[in-house]
Amino acid sequence: MSRQTEILVDVEVEMMFASGNTERFRLGDIPCTWVWDEVSREAAEYWAAFDHIGNNYTFDWMSIKSWTGSPVKEKT
């Protein structure tokens, strides 16, 4: 069984849309599964945010300005 942690990522992103408008905003609660033996936590969080943005937004370009992740607390 692989060692992994479920994380929720918050990200600040800047995007330019086809209209030429540029917007900067935050997105939150992006799910991420960090598999410890495959990639660093930072990389897992970044790519989870990157994939979420790419799958849910249409833009000409985007830049992830910052991100942070918090492990999901299991319900007891």
Image (spheres, helix red, strand yellow):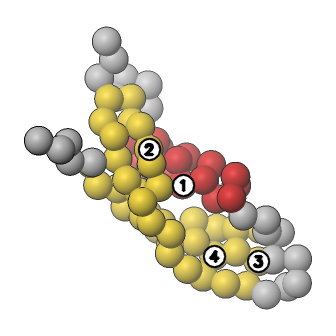
Residue 17: % across, % down: 81, 77
Residue type beneath disc 3: Met
Tell me the amino acid under the disc marked 2: Cys
**Sequence-earlier tag: 2 or 4:** 4
> In which quadrant of the rendered image does the N terminus lie?
top left
Give the alpha-carbon distance from disc 3 to disc 2, as whole Å: 25 Å
Mark 1–mark 4 distance (CA, rounded to whole Å)? 13 Å
Measure the alpha-carbon separation of dots 3 and 4.
7 Å
Q: Earlier in the sequence, mark 1 or mark 4?
A: 4
Q: Secondary structure at mark 3?
A: strand
Q: In x, y percent, where is residue 55? A: 70, 52
Residue denoted by label 2: 32
| C-alpha separation, residue under disc 2 versus residue under disc 1 | 8 Å
Mark 1 residue type:
Ala
Q: Which residue is at a point 29% across and 55% down the rendered structure image?
A: 70
Please name the residue shown 88% across and 84% down the image: 19
Q: Left or right? Give the position of 27 relative to 52.
A: left
Mark 3 or mark 1, earlier in chain: 3
Q: Which residue: 58% across, 71% down?
A: 13
Tell me, for residue 49, which label it has, or none.
1
SS class of the residue under badge 4? strand
Single out the residue that lies furthest toward the top: 1
Binning the other alpha carbons within 10 Å of mark 4 as few (below 14), some (14 to 19) or many (20 upward) gives some
Spot occupied by residue 38 in the image (x, y as percentages of width and height): 44, 25
**Is disc 1 placed on a helix, strand or loop?**
helix
